[in-house]
Image (cartoon, rainbow, N blue to C red):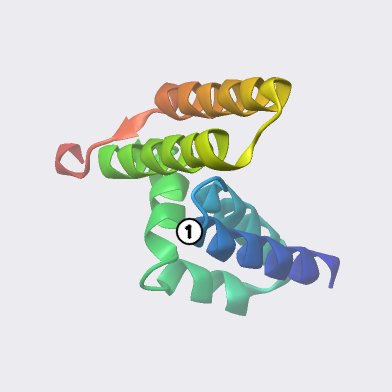
Amino acid sequence: MAYLAAGHVLLGLGIVGFILPVMPGVVFLIGAAACYARGSARFYDWLLANKWLGPPVRDWRAHRAMTIRAKVVSITMVLVGVGVSILFFVQLPWLRIVLAATAAGVTILILTINTYRPSES
């Protein structure tokens, strides 16, 4: 029951992550899939079969990698989201530095993940 509840929370965060540019939606979806795999075969199968949410989870599961498109979209969303926050909403210099460092760290992390090229398999 706890895995199912955690899966639902992570699924919700994953969906929000697809909408908000500063949240990594795929990471939460992978976590939801892990919870569902232990708590509910029905929800696990649903998530993997979902037209919009399933492909990045299936790619990660099969290849432990991200496609180039997923990397570009992820990095663009992080940089745009954090950039807009820094330029228009955050006034404190130290917080701007923290946000910029976080964006740089997330960008570096994404770049270090293996790249999956579907034509190579």
Compared with 40, 99 (above or below) is: above
Q: In percent of the image, x 49 and y 61: which residue is there?
A: 19
Q: Is residue 63 left or right of residue 40?
A: left
Q: In percent of the image, x 62 and y 65: which residue is there?
A: 11
Q: Nearer the viewer, residue 93 or 48?
A: 93
Compared with 20, 96 (above or below) is: above
Q: In percent of the image, x 51 and y 51: which residue is there?
A: 26
The quarter holding residue 96 reads: top right
Image quadrant holding the C terminus, namely top left
Q: Is residue 16 left or right of residue 77?
A: right
How many marks are shown on the rendered structure? 1
- The residue indicated by pointer 1 is 18
On the image, the x and y values in percent for residue 10 come to: 67, 60
Secondary structure of residue under mark 1: helix
On the image, the x and y values in percent for residue 45 come to: 52, 73
The quarter holding residue 6 reads: bottom right
Compared with 98, 116 (above or below) is: below
Q: Nearer the viewer, residue 120 or 92?
A: 92
On the image, the x and y values in percent for residue 112 come to: 44, 22
| Amino acid type, callout 1 | Phe
Image quadrant holding the N terminus, namely bottom right
On the image, the x and y values in percent for residue 60 come to: 44, 46
Q: Is residue 92 left or right of residue 74?
A: right
Residue projecting furthest to the bottom? 42
Residue projecting furthest to the left? 119
Q: How busy is the neighbourhood of tag 1: few (under 14 within 10 Å), some, or many (20 plus)?
A: some
